């Protein structure tokens, strides 16, 4: 039998990730589990005189620290209304979302992933891709995906 003690909740500040966060909080309460809330921050590209300069991980660029702090504040605000258990771990990591989620899921102690999905299909899915699909295919633990409630205006836009 699978024992769930730690739930990873990747969020992107969307309505589906809000639904996932609330569902994970309820599960954690019933299972006496802890929660790790993860937001993946993709460092911006920079345009210089010779074209696009891609920010490499670990390279310090003017203003990046402030942008990261801003993202961390947004994460704290996003989770503020959720009934999360004591000891909830808030993380902001840099990288591609699916890769960062899978890396976090591979850490010892992560027993389940609860994440939102935008439910894109057709051309939009081909162009944008599906983070949830990549996570489901490669995760080392069970993955529960949730869409935002029907009729949610933000969910319909994403």
Image: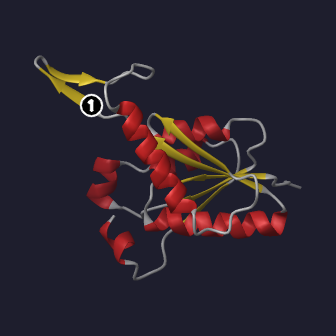
Rendered image quadrant of residue 61 = top left
Q: Quadrant of the C terminus?
A: bottom left
Q: Is 102 above or below relative to 158?
A: above
At a point 38% along the width and 37% down the height, the residue shown is 66
At a point 31% along the width and 26% down the height, the residue shown is 62
- Per the image, the residue denoted by label 1 is 45
| Residue at the left extreme of this rendering | 49
At a point 76% along the width and 58% down the height, the residue shown is 86
> Could you tell me if residue 11 is visible in this image?
no
Q: Quadrant of the N terminus?
A: bottom right
Secondary structure type for disc 1: strand
**Horizontal and vertical percent position of residue 36:** 66, 49
- Crowding at dot 1, Cα within 10 Å, few <14 / some 14-19 / many 20+, comes out as few
Rendered image quadrant of residue 123 = bottom left
**Horizontal and vertical percent position of residue 95:** 45, 34
Q: Is 131 above or below relative to 95?
A: below
């Amino acid at each position: 039998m699978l024992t769930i003690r730690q739930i990873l909740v990747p969020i992107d500040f969307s309505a589906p990730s809000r639904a996932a966060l609330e569902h994970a909080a309820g599960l954690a309460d019933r299972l006496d589990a802890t929660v790790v809330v993860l937001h993946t921050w993709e460092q911006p590209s920079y345009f210089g005189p010779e074209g696009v300069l891609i920010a490499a991980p670990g390279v310090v660029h003017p203003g990046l620290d402030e942008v990261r702090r801003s993202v961390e504040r947004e994460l704290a605000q996003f989770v503020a209304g959720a009934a999360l258990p004591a000891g909830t771990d808030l993380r902001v990591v840099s990288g591609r979302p699916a890769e960062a989620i899978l890396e976090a899921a591979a850490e010892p102690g992560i027993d389940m992933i609860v994440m939102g999905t935008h439910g894109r299909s057709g051309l939009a899915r081909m162009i944008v891709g599906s983070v949830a699909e990549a996570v489901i295919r490669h995760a080392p633990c069970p993955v529960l995906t949730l869409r935002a409630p029907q009729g949610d205006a933000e969910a319909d836009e994403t």
